[in-house]
Image (tube, grey):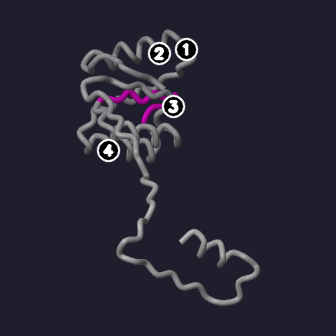
Amino acid sequence: MENSFRTIQSRDNMGKVVVEFKPDDTVNVVLDVKPNFQFNTDATYIIAGGLGGLGRSVSRWFVERGARHLILLSRSGAKSTEAQELVAELTSSRTQVKTPACDIADRKALRLALDECLRDMPVVRGCI
């Protein structure tokens, strides 16, 4: 098969190429192996910038892999339409989502936001 494709690609080829398979031919296959990593369902994961474009994608990726408790930090909170749609989407996937407005560069504001969120959430196991 590989030789057939190479012949087709060459400049010397002016005609058609016919490929025939015989019952005893072996076909080599490269499998697309996907990681099977799963997040702990009884843990909280914090995503700084979690309501921006990249943060929304990362949030979905976490939930697809089992995360069920997320704190999505952003300076403005869930005010935008996209942020509200994300929260609705994740909540419908049985995910607890908190979206405090918080500037993570302000240590005091960050501490207050996390203390408030973690009152009824499991232990933090990761953050981005």
Secondary structure type for disc 1: loop
Q: Amino acid at mark 1?
A: Asp
Distance Cα–Cα, label 4 vs label 3: 18 Å
> Dot 1: few (<14), some (14–19), or many (≥20) neighbours within 10 Å?
few
Q: Which residue is mark 2?
A: 110
Labelled pair 2, 1 in contact (Cβ < 8 Å): yes
* Position in image of residue 44 (x %, y %): 33, 24
Residue lying furthest bottom in this view?
Answer: 15
Residue drawn at (37%, 71%) of the image: 24
* Position in image of residue 11 (x %, y %): 76, 79
Residue drawn at (53%, 72%) of the image: 1
Give whichever of discs 4 and 2 has the lower sequence position. 4
Labelled pair 1, 4 in contact (Cβ < 8 Å): no
Give whichever of discs 1 and 3 has the lower sequence position. 3
Residue lying furthest front in this view?
Answer: 24
Give whichever of discs 1 and 4 has the lower sequence position. 4
Judge whether 63 appears above or below 74 on screen: below
Distance Cα–Cα, label 4 vs label 2: 24 Å
Q: Which residue is mark 1?
A: 106
Residue 71 magenta-highlighted: yes
Give whichever of discs 3 and 2 has the lower sequence position. 3
Residue drawn at (41%, 17%) of the image: 113
Q: Which residue is mark 4?
A: 88
Give whichever of discs 4 and 3 has the lower sequence position. 3
> Which residues are the magenta region?
69-78
Distance Cα–Cα, label 2 vs label 1: 6 Å
Secondary structure type for disc 3: loop
Mark nearer the viewer, 1 or 3: 3
Rendered image: mark on residue 48? none
Q: Which residue is mark 3?
A: 49
Secondary structure type for disc 4: helix
Residue drawn at (52%, 28%) of the image: 75
